[in-house]
Amino acid sequence: MGNVLQLKSEEAPKSKSQILSDVDIHASHHHNCNNSNNTKVTEEPHPLNKQTTASQGDSLQPPERDLKAPADDTSPTSSEEVADTSVIKQAWKLEVGKPASGKKQSGVPTSPSNISGVISVKSAVFEKWAAMDREFQRPLAKRQLSDESKACTFSRVKKSAAHRGPTEGQHTLHADTALTRHTESSGPQLAGNAQVTHRKLQRELFSTTDVFRKVDAHAIKVGKELRSKKIYSVQMITQAITEGAQTDLQKLRAIWTWLCHNIEYDVSGYLGLTKKVTSPEQVIETGRGVCCGYSTVLQLMCSVVGIKCEEVSGHGKGIGFRQGQTFQNTKSSHMWNAVNLQGHWYLLDSCWGAGSVDMDNKAFIKRYDDFYFLTDPENFINSHCPDEPGWQLLDKPIQLEEFEKRVMKTSEFYRLGLTLIYPKHFFLVTENGEATVSMGFSQPLDFTYQASLRSGTDQEELSTSIGLLTVTTGSMKLKLMPPVSGTFNIMVFARPANATGMFSWVCSFLLECLEPAPVQELPENPFLSWGLQQNAQSLGLKLCQYCSDVTILESGSFELVLHTTRPLMMLCELTHRDLDKTVAKRCLATQIQPNQLTCHVLCPFIGYYRLSVFVRDYESVGDSFQNAGNFLLHCTSGAINLNELFPADLSTSCGPGVRTVNAGLSKFSHTTAQLSTQQGKCNITFHNSQDLELHTMLSKEHRKRAGKPLSRHVFFTYHASKVTISIALPEAGVYKLSLYGKTAGSTNQDFNLLCDFVLRNSSESSWPPFPCSYTAWQKGFVLFEPRSGLLEPGSWVRFRVRVPGAKRVSVQGEQRTELQLNKSRVWEGEVFTGTSATLLKLAAAGTAGCGEGSNSMAIIMSFDVLSGQNEL
């Protein structure tokens, strides 16, 4: 029941109404021969523990039972009815053949000794039977087939519980598609003059269960009222709950709803802790029953409203069922119903619709599940296999062996619109240490799974890192890579995408790993699946080249590029079994551009990494970040030295991006976040259209030798809107260059970070610092020579500098040297550094910031002169 219920009972023979449909007829009718008070019912929670083989005789001649319905419902009221009952209780055997005498015989009861010829029955008997077939509330006797009649008849005989279904190449025609039955077919048949029409799918019968909202509400409400009044009559309850129902479908729905909400599964009886409740009267009064209790009550209620209904016995993948379990040579373990609507048969299981059983706590869990209401046969067969193949209602019934191999699918599997792509059977065997499960779906779903290693009767739950789960638009793929050999239970769970509720179990598999692949442990993924998440596009991401497979890294570095449809903010997370969080931050550098997100990754260890990406709209500062993708990286060689990781405290905005664009900076010479130099020197140029006041900070961890501040190793040059940042690095290593800006002339505004650059210097050369510039050094000023801020003592140095608008430019040291303005508007001259001076000062007069309109000199730049103790 409810995805976990499995009960065992003996088979139920075909009803009289079914047999009347065939050319040859064996008269009998039943409600539930397997679960009567006079019939022994075998119900075992674990079929594997005890297998019972049903004899052919037991199957062909089930025990006789007189089912007593409520007196006000079925008691005969006339002598004619009494006579009808006496007639029907005889063991009629009608056979089609050639009589020895060549004459038709009268329609009288025939003993087994008179089976040599054709036996006919008076038409009056058929009329009586037909009349009784319309009075469903009347109890009918069961049919009995003798060995002799069994040998001569063409009618279908119910197979024993050990029967394995039709043999290969044998076809059982569906009742909806054929009027003529083969001798090897069984199950439902068409009424005498019924036309062959299409049996509707569940979605064709009703598009949604909302159409039953009023019917359901009425059945539940009335059911409570009747129970409070202690009314337990089948007829009274049925008439009350179906009041107002216009069609057979609505009446059946009301009966189904009442059963599922008023009868609980008899767990204690099933376990043998109390006496099992089986009779319909007890089931209704106590409000509990096993599977045959549900099916019998439903059949009785259908008879009250004139709906043809049969009980179907068979195997169900319910209580105690384990993947790999066999049903061979075991008696049927479950009962459900088939109903005839508009001339076609449909399947339903009210026992499973009422809820499920928690075997750990020996309790019934009331959980209404209307999936089992008129379930499509193609889906029903995955969990219910009738003893008679015809009751599969399939054009080509499957064999019991195939039923055992079918993947165990729960009702949620179909409710979520899942389809199984691979495998078709539950049993998987690894190849090269791997096995794959894949499914399709029509609506966005999230998935997860659970793996456990079987050890005898126990199971050891493993982490989800034994597999690689990826979900793309319309499909999921689970690549399983068990770490050890053995047998594993794999349970797959799903839920609607972006939902916050619990996951629902949808299907299960059995995985056999003969030899595990020599792979390292995969990192845990708390974000369910690998690759881009299904909602990535709604978050603003475009589909990317990085699929769900593992990305192999041979150099120890990786660059993830994600294109966007709108500006996004991004955060990234990197995990590895040997990587702590502090070091992990130094393995990532992110660049956020208007239409692209880039994450630079460094791998300091060999092995598997999880790279997770989180995004939000750039301007939505108050919104939370959402997981947009998770990528599995496998570093096989070239691990990065810990001293060569990214600088600490990098901002999320590395390289030119949204911030620089918003600030009016453009046309960067270097558009990436990382710059590498083999000479130790580089220039970064860009345009400053909004004339921002700019500032930089250069930093490096663990400088090998002391020297001038690193700020002296960066030099600004302005030419109109073009800005050049020159960098001369004092030693090899990794540097962070931060660029700041603010509105020019603003005294109340702080500098804002525009971006960070990562500089990698592989040169062993030590470049000197630049000259120290002062506030009088204005935009448009250009220093051509000397570029070094450290000068040799006692040497002549050529100075060349452009100072627009200056009336006078000089260099002050041990002595003053006036520079001359050449035709190119450049001030130049030879300057002696002297032997005692420690500083040379470059000064100008007549320009803005330098005493414009006056002859006063303002220092714009200074140079250090080396001493004996101050070596480069």
Image (cartoon, rainbow, N blue to C red):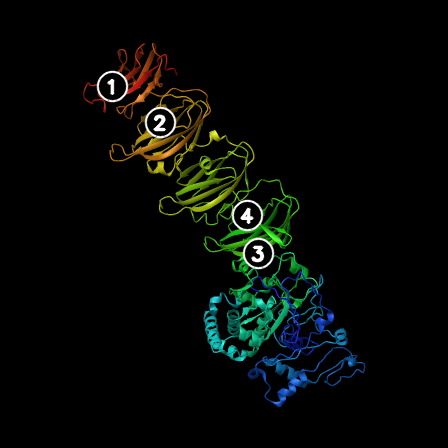
Judged from this view, the residue extending furthest toward the right is 100
Q: Is residue 565 visible?
A: no
Q: Secondary structure at mark 4?
A: helix
Cα gap from disc 1 to disc 2, whole angstroms: 22 Å
- Which residue position holds label 2? 724
Three-letter code for the amino acid on which mark 1 is drawn: Ala
Q: Looking at the image, is mark 2 or mark 4 earlier in the sequence?
A: 4
Q: Looking at the image, is mark 4 or mark 1 earlier in the sequence?
A: 4
Q: Position of residue 372 (x, y in %)?
A: 55, 65
Q: Are marks 3 and 2 in contact (CB under 8 Å)?
A: no
Q: Residues within 10 Å of mark 1 (few under 14, many from 20)?
A: many
Three-letter code for the amino acid on which mark 3 is drawn: Cys
Residue pictured at 50% horizontal, 65% vertical: 207
Q: Quadrant of residue 62?
A: bottom right
Identify the image quadrant of the N terminus.
Answer: bottom right
Cα gap from disc 3 to disc 2, whole angstroms: 63 Å
Q: Looking at the image, is mark 3 or mark 4 earlier in the sequence?
A: 4
- Which residue position holds label 1? 844
Mark 4 or mark 1, whichever is nearer to me:
4
- Which residue position holds label 3? 507
